[in-house]
Amino acid sequence: MTVTVPAPVRTPSNNHGGAVQTSLLSRVVPMGIMTIAAVYVLLPLWWLLVGASKDQGQLADGNPLWFSDLRLLSNLDQLFAYRDGIFLRWMLNSLAYTGGAALLGTLLAGMCGYALAKYRFPGREVLFNVILGGVLVPATALALPLFLMFSTVHAANTFWSVFLPSLVNPFGVYLARIYAATSVPDDLMEAARIDGAGEVRTFFTVSARLMAPAFLTIFLFHFVAIWNNFLLPLIMLGNEKLFPVTLGLYTWNSQATQNPELRGLVLIGALVSIVPMIAVFLLLQRFWRGGLNAGSLK
């Protein structure tokens, strides 16, 4: 005798409703978290923009998150005219430190990572591990030894005491090695050698073009890190004419209790100081994103 077990009766309408509810919940929760994160990140920038457009009295009495009388242009005139334009000198110093060190540091990191990825020599892995260990060492731990070294050779309180340490970028070496290992074929390098190209020419005419997205990524990370560097200039520099903008604004902010006028200049100066970073991202994001998309298609 065979016993037939009846199939369970399904309720399509209830399952469909649960799936819709789960799908809606899976969209709403991430969007809510991302919205909160976006507000958390953008709120200080909004406060900075609003504060930079006010005068001293409006800063103390007005709504800190909304505009009063727009005085942005007059505040900019006051900022660039204060003490014969010392703020403009600090901005130029930051551009010199950051632009030069980011370009040279990116080239050095790219060449070093390329050599570690494409050439086999004794001690290669040991050398790479030592460089990789440099990523884990905080910059604050290196600032004092660097100051003692530059003081020994009487190079402290000079342009080079900030510029030369900024060239070192262990994280850039790591990125360059990873990217070169996957994006530069050995067969292509061998073909270039057969055609008579030397190693230097092969790097600059063949490999560097393939590594362009990695170079842009390293440059952006390096540019932001140097621009925001504060501790190294604080320890190395005593002459305010050599200050980068971060250190200059810090000195103004430390004097704001004795001179309340500086509080408004610090706000408008901080707003102006982030303009170069925004410009660099807007100019390079197209090439950076295009390179990443090309790499994903490979």
Image (tube, helix red, strand yellow):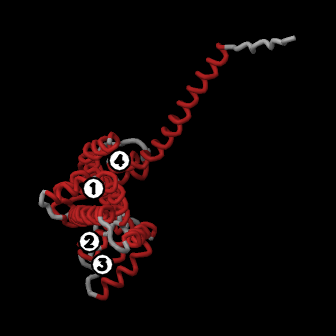
Quadrant location, the C terminus: top left
Q: Earlier in the sequence, mark 2 or mark 4?
A: 4
- Tell me the SS state at disc 3: loop
Is 93 in front, or is 187?
Answer: 187
Q: Which residue is mark 4?
A: 49
Q: Give the spatial CA distance, label 4 vs label 1.
A: 51 Å
Q: Which residue is mark 2?
A: 163
Is 132 in front, or is 29?
Answer: 132
Q: Earlier in the sequence, mark 1 or mark 3?
A: 1
Q: Residue furthest bottom?
A: 152
Q: Amino acid at mark 4?
A: Leu
Q: Which residue is mark 1?
A: 186
Q: Earlier in the sequence, mark 4 or mark 3?
A: 4
Q: Give the spatial CA distance, label 2 vs label 3.
A: 15 Å
**Contact check, label 2 and label 4, Cβ < 8 Å:** no
Viewer-nearest of labels 2 and 3? 2
Q: Which residue is mark 3?
A: 238
Q: Residue furthest front?
A: 1
Q: Where is residue 22? Give x, y as percent.
A: 60, 27
Q: Amino acid at mark 3?
A: Gly
Viewer-nearest of labels 4 and 3? 3
